[in-house]
Amino acid sequence: MIRLSDKSPSEIAEMKILWKEYFGDSDGFIDFYFDKICAGNKIVVMREDGILTGMLHLNPYVFSRDGKEIIRTYYVVGVMVREGYRNQGRMKKMFDYAYSVLSSERIKFIYLWPPNEAYYNGVGFGTVSQMVDIIFKKEDLELLRDEMVTSKSDVEFGKMIRNLIMPLYSADNINAMVSELCSEGGSFNCLEKRGTIQGCYSILRNGNVLEVDHIVPYFGLREYMGRLFDSIEETLSSIEAEEVEYDSVEISDDITDTENNVLNDIEIDGASDIESIDEDSSIKYIKLTMDYRIMQCFKHTLDMNQVSLSRKYMVAALEELPFDPGNLLFSEIV
């Protein structure tokens, strides 16, 4: 049987166990998600002989086009089918049920960031945006800033943004994202201009890598990137200050193994530039995850005759094509 979850304590408890088994997230994040996010979402569940065999979460969001047209939609997360019940069409049945529910709400599309696009080939999704990771050494931060924060990027971004459908962040979903990042030890940053939110991004430490994601600008790209680089520098300074304070006290021999949380085997210019974490766990690399279309606004750095840092790192990112995982998929509701 497929239905919308009644979110009873017993069913929530079952979903938490299934989420932990399938996605492996921390207990802190799982508790936050089911206590806070699930209060306002829809959850499609599948039960067979009393067993919870699958679930699909629909989290409400609002998008806008050119800052004018308002589009209500849902972000799809937590899609899973219990082991032993997979590859038998159950995921498609859950999506078909979700489409039937949302069609009455006049929802135009739903979207997701899949771990693998192939999972969603048969359920109506198509790629609309591609994400690129730009990974660079911490010591190159200031030089990269000088090359990327330019007026030329503003011109290109102005041409592009008029045709983009962008998330429209409200106080509620910003509070949710702040809480989510805090539950994982990170931060969510909003940029305001003339009293309205004009951009946002998240910063999260992952081993010796500082990950910068959710990069959504609404105004000039030069000003946005300048403020983003300011935040990265402030975060690095804060982390370094904490490490100095930590080093000044006695350290226990019982150190948690964080090696699996570090980005490994990412090659730039044919050599592995990301090292596995060792005794020196300080930040060594910064990773910007950016929409491919936004990154194209920096194409002047790719066209430069000289060999520049931004050219090196961006070309390395482009060589990661196709962009899988990380593509934004939309599915139209008919």
Image: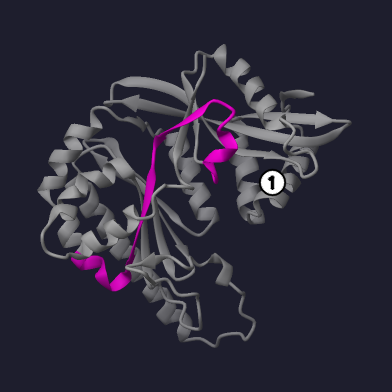
Looking at the figure, which quarter contains the N terminus? top right
Choose between 211 and 41: the one closer to the eye.
211
Question: Residue placed at 21% from the left, 38% from the top?
Answer: 219
Residue drawn at 20 percent across, 49 percent down: 298
Q: Residue 150: percent from the left, percent from the top?
A: 13, 52
**61 sits left or right of 299 in the view:** right
Stretch of the chain drawn in magenta: 114-143
Please tell me which residue lies in front, 325 or 210: 325
Residue visible at 31% across and 70% down in the picture: 138
- Image coords of residue 152 (percent x, y): 11, 46
Q: Which residue is mark 1?
A: 19
| Residue 74 x %, y % | 51, 28
Q: Is residue 117 magenta?
A: yes
Q: Is residue 115 visible?
A: yes
Q: Residue at x 89, y 31 (%)?
A: 49
The kind of residue tagged 1 is Trp
